[in-house]
Image (cartoon, grey):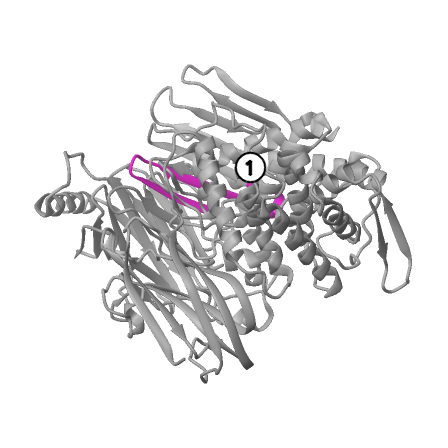
Amino acid sequence: MAGARFGPLVIDPATRDLNLQAEVASSIPGGKAFRLTLYLTHDSVFPDQAQRVLARANRSIKGDSRGRVGLNASIPRHAIPGKPIHAFIELSSADLDRRGRPGPPAAGKLVVRGIDLLSSSLPAASTIEARRRSFLQFAGRSAIANELGGIHTKSTLRMPGLLASIIEVKDPRDPRLTRFMEETVLIVKALRANKNRVGPFEIYFPIANHVAAKRLLGTLLTSHPEYPAYEKAVFDFQCSWPDYKSNGDHWPRSPIREAKTIADVPGNIDNGNFRLLVTAAGYLSAQTFPRLRTTLVNPKTGEATVFERERILREMTLYLRRVYHSIATCNTWEYGAQTYLAIDFAPIHMIAEYAEDPEIRRIAVQTLDCLYSSLATSLNQGHYIHAAGRSKGEFLGTGSAIGFIGWLAFGSDRPGQGSTTPFNVYPALPGRYRVPDAIRPTLRFPYAKRERIGDGSALVATYTWQSRSFGLTNAIEARAAVRRAKDKNWDRDSFFKEAGRNKLNWIGERPGGFSPQWENSRQPYGRLRDTPNGRYYGSNPWSQVVQHQGTQIGLADVRDGYPFRKLYVSYPVQQLRARVVKSDWTLCHSGSVVFAFRSLKQPTTPAENRSGQITDYYDYRKTAWILEVAEAPKSQGRKSDAAVAEEIERFHRTLLRSKVEVSGLDDASKESPVLAYTSPISGRTLKLDAAVYPIPADGDGVPPVDYPVLATDPVEKGGPRVLQQDQRLRWFGPRGETLVDHDFRDWVR
C-alpha cells in the first residue's frame, strides 16, 4: 500500500480537540510500520505544504495487531476564530523518524475500518452532575478506543479511562467490566515482571481505581468471577512498593525515619504531586488490605526493613496530616501549574471520598476547600488566569487541565474540552465531597488577588488583577536573592526553566493572550543547559517584572556569558481586531480590551510573521518594556472598524501623558539599569532596579514575605473576599459576614 487519503471533513469551529478512533488489522513484517495520520487545516484541499497544517497527530502500526486504535489532535491557538476547520485522514506505508521525516516504505497489509472522528467538546451544563457525567462518558469512550499495545509505565495512564468506562455498568456480564479487570491485571503484572521503573503515578492508579470501583459498583464488581484474580493482582502490586514515604522505587539516599508522632514527619515536607500520590496510595492500600506487607531492602547492605499494614496506616495518617497542613499554610508547590495542579487534586479527592478515618477525611475536605478557593479566585468567566509554576508553554488558560477542573466544579457558559489529563477522572467521580456554596468564582470586577507559595528562600509571591474582560498576572520569587548572592550557578534552578510569571489573558469574541518573554535555557538537565527553551516556557533568571492593576513594566540585565538573552514579543493578530504602531507604542484592540506595549529599545530583526503571530525580537543584554491594559469602552453589539480605530486613538492620546525615566540601559554600561514609569491611567509610579532583589510583585510594595497564602481585594464595596492566612481560611459575604471558616492549627498537634 503506497498510501490513501480521505477528506475533507468539516469540523465545528468551536471544537478545540478531536478524537479519532478506528478498527485496524495489520500484518507488517520486518520491524517497520505503517502510519495513520490526522491533519487539521483551514484549507479544503489536502495539506501538502507543512505551513498549511494547523495540527497533526500520528499513530504507528507495527507487526501483527488487531483491535481499536485512537489518537487525538488539538487545534492550536493560532487557528483563525470562527473559520471552518477541515480534517483529513492519511494512511501511509512510510513511518516517520524522530525528526518527523518519512522513512522507507514498509511491506505487508493494513486494513482500517469504522473510522470515527469525534469532538471532545463537552456541552455546557448547569449542574456539576451533568458535567461530570459527560466527561466520564468521554474518558470511558477514549479508554475503549485505544488498544493496549506494549506495556510500560505510561500504560498506567490508561487506567483512569478504564475506571470511567465502568461507571455506568449495571450488569455483571457487561464486557466493559471484564475488560477493566483483565487489563488492570495485565498492566500491574507487567510492571513487575518487566522491572519497569515504578514511580508515584504507577503506584497510585491501581489502588485508586480499585477503591473507587469497589465503592461505585459494590457486588457487581466483587461477585464477578474474575474479581478474586483482579484483587490479588492489585494486592500483590501494592505489596511490592518498597516505601510509601519515598518518591521512587529505589532505596532513599538517606533513610526515612519511622514516624510514630506528627513531630517525626519533616515540617518542610514536599507537598507536590509525587508526595500526594504516594501517601494517598499508602493510606488507601493499608486501609483496604489487612494483610498488606512490604519489604524495603538496602541494596548496599542487604538489610531488610519490613513494613506491616499497621505501621503503614499509622505513618500514612501522620504524613497526610503534615502534607495537607503544608498545603493549607504554604500553598501547593505546583501553584498555577496547568497540568500538575490538576494532578494534585486527584489523590486529595480520593482521601476526602474514601478515607474511613473521619478526622483524616475532614482534613482532606478542608484541604480541597483551600485548593478550590485558589482555583475559584483564578477563574475569570471560565478562563484560568494565574502565574504558572510549571507552564509547559500553555499560558492562555482556556483549555488547560486545571482550567478543566474549574469547569467541572463551577461550570461555565462555554463547553468544556474532554482531552485533558486522565487524573481529572477522579475529581469527576460521583461522591460525597461538595465545594461549599460560598467558594465560587466572582462575577463582580475588578479585584486584586495576592497569593503566596512556599516559605523562606523558596517563597513565591503572585499578584493578579482580574477585570471584566481581562486578567493580568505577575509572580516573583524570593530565592533569587539568596542564589544570586551565594551561588554563581543559581541560574540552573529548574524554576526558571518552567515558570511562566507574567501574562495577559483577555475574554470576549476573540479570547487570547499576550506575554512578553525573555529567552531562557532548558537547564538544569545536563547538556540541555545551553539549549534554548520552548516559547512561553520558563523565565530568564536575570529578568524582573512589577505590576499595578493593568500596568506592568519589565527589566532585564542578563549576565555576560549567559547564552540566552533575547526579549521576544508575540502579537496574536488573529485574536485581535486591530494592531497599529504609533510613537513607539504598539496598540492592540481585541474588541473588548485595548492594550499597548512599548519597548525602550528598537527590535534587532524584522518582525517575524508566522502561524498567526507577529513577533518582534530584541537581542540585547539589557532590555526594558511597558505594558498598559484597559477595558475597551462599552458599546452595543459588535463594534465597527471605525469605532475600534477611534478607541485605539483615544487610548494612544492617554498614553502620551505617561512619564518614563531610565538609566544604565546601554549594554556597554557597567551601571545596573533602572526603570521608572508613571501610568497616566492609575497615576501610580512603578520602579525596577536590576541591582535590587527581591522586589515586590505589585506596585503597592507589599514584600513577598508579607503576602498572605491567599487573599482577594475587591474594588467594589461589598464584593466577595477570601483570606487564607495564619493557619486559617475564611470567606466573607457582601456584608462582611463569615461564610467559610477553617482552622488548620489542630492538624499537626
Q: Is residue 722 magenta?
A: no
Q: Which residue is mark 1?
A: 429
Mark 1 crowdedness (10 Å alpha carbons): few <14, some 14-19, many ≥20: many
Which quadrant of the rendered structure holds the N terminus?
bottom left
Query: Is residue 647 found left or right of 34 in the rendered image?
Result: left
Q: Is residue 525 visible?
A: yes
* Magenta residues (range): 453-475
Query: Is residue 87 found left or right of 240 in the rendered image?
Result: left
Q: Is residue 266 visible?
A: no
Name the residue at the left extreme. Answer: 642
Indicate the amino acid at tag 1. Answer: Leu
The residue shown at (32%, 59%) is: 569
Q: Nearer the viewer, residue 356 or 704?
A: 356
Prevailing secondary structure of the magenta residues: strand
Q: Is residue 571 above or below residue 282?
A: below
Residue 163 falls in image quadrant:
top right
Q: Nearer the viewer, residue 420 or 504?
A: 420
Q: Is residue 472 magenta?
A: yes
Query: Is residue 434 found left or right of 347 in the rendered image?
Result: left
The residue shown at (33%, 71%) is: 5
Q: Position of residue 153 (x, y in %)?
A: 64, 60
Q: Nearer the viewer, residue 233 or 600?
A: 233
Query: Is residue 283 found left or right of 433 in the rendered image?
Result: right
Q: Nearer the viewer, residue 211 or 146?
A: 146
Which quadrant of the rendered structure holds the C terminus?
top right
Q: Position of residue 7 (x, y in %)?
A: 29, 65
